[in-house]
Image (cartoon, helix red, strand yellow):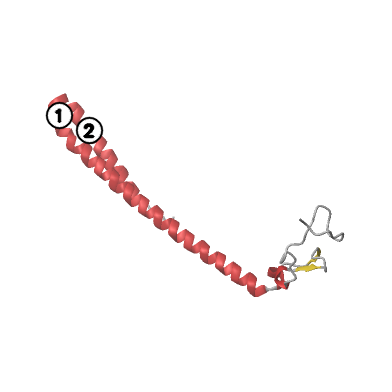
Amino acid sequence: MGDDRTDLPEGTDTILAGASNTDDTTNVDTTETGLVTETRTPATRSNPDLRKRIREGGERLSTEATDRARGLVSQGLERSAEALANVSKLVGDTADGLDERLGQEYGDYARRAATAIEDTANKIASKNPMN
């Protein structure tokens, strides 16, 4: 099954093709056996251009995420305000029927509730997601 080599680490029975990597981009030196013998400074420390590109990319992604989140919040505020305005209209429209069936006291209660719901809808609509 495995190689009968004695130069392999304990518990290792074979070296897979391509398992040893001598490519400098990995910043790892290997011996003839493919074992790691030395590690060096990561590429980002020795390459200021790469650090700059990574930082700029991170800033760009952060800006895009912020803009997207603000757009979603704005959309949510708008939809919430519309839904509450519809509920307010529905409650207000039932006030006359409540006057007839249950008395004016209940109709007035429905009108006050409709006004309060409409005020809340207006407050939500006036919110600015940029703050």
Q: Compared with residue 66, is residue 47 higher up or lower down, i.e. above or below?
A: below
Q: Compared with residue 102, is residue 69 higher up or lower down, i.e. above or below?
A: below
Query: Splitting the image into 4 quarters, where does residue 120 fall?
Result: top left
Q: Is residue 36 visible?
A: yes
In-front residue for pair 107/91 = 91
Q: Does dot 1 land on a helix, a strand or a loop?
A: helix
Q: Compared with residue 78, is residue 37 higher up or lower down, i.e. above or below?
A: below
Residue at point 79% right, 55% down?
A: 12
Q: Is residue 126 visible?
A: no
Q: Amino acid at mark 2?
A: Ala
Disc number for residue 110 = 2
Classify the position of the N terminus by image quarter. bottom right
Residue at point 24% right, 38% down?
A: 114
Between discs 1 and 2, the one toward the N terminus: 1
Gap in Å between the C-alphas at discs 1 and 2? 10 Å
Tally of numbered tags:
2
Residue at point 31% right, 47% down?
A: 81
- Residues marked 1 and 2 touching at CB (< 8 Å): no
Disc number for residue 121 = none
Count residues near mark 1 (Cα–Cα under 10 Å), then give few for <14, some for 14-19, many for 20+: some
Query: Splitting the image into 4 quarters, where does residue 40 fall?
Result: bottom right
Q: Which residue is mark 1?
A: 99
In-front residue for pair 8/27 = 8
Farthest left residue in view: 100
Q: Does dot 2 land on a helix, a strand or a loop?
A: helix
Image location of residue 46, percent across then percent down: 72, 72
Query: Splitting the image into 4 quarters, where does residue 6 fall?
Result: bottom right
Q: Compared with residue 120, is residue 70 higher up or lower down, i.e. above or below?
A: below
Residue at point 29% right, 45% down?
A: 83
Image location of residue 10, percent across then percent down: 84, 53
76 displayed left or right of 4: left
Image location of residue 74, percent across then percent down: 37, 54
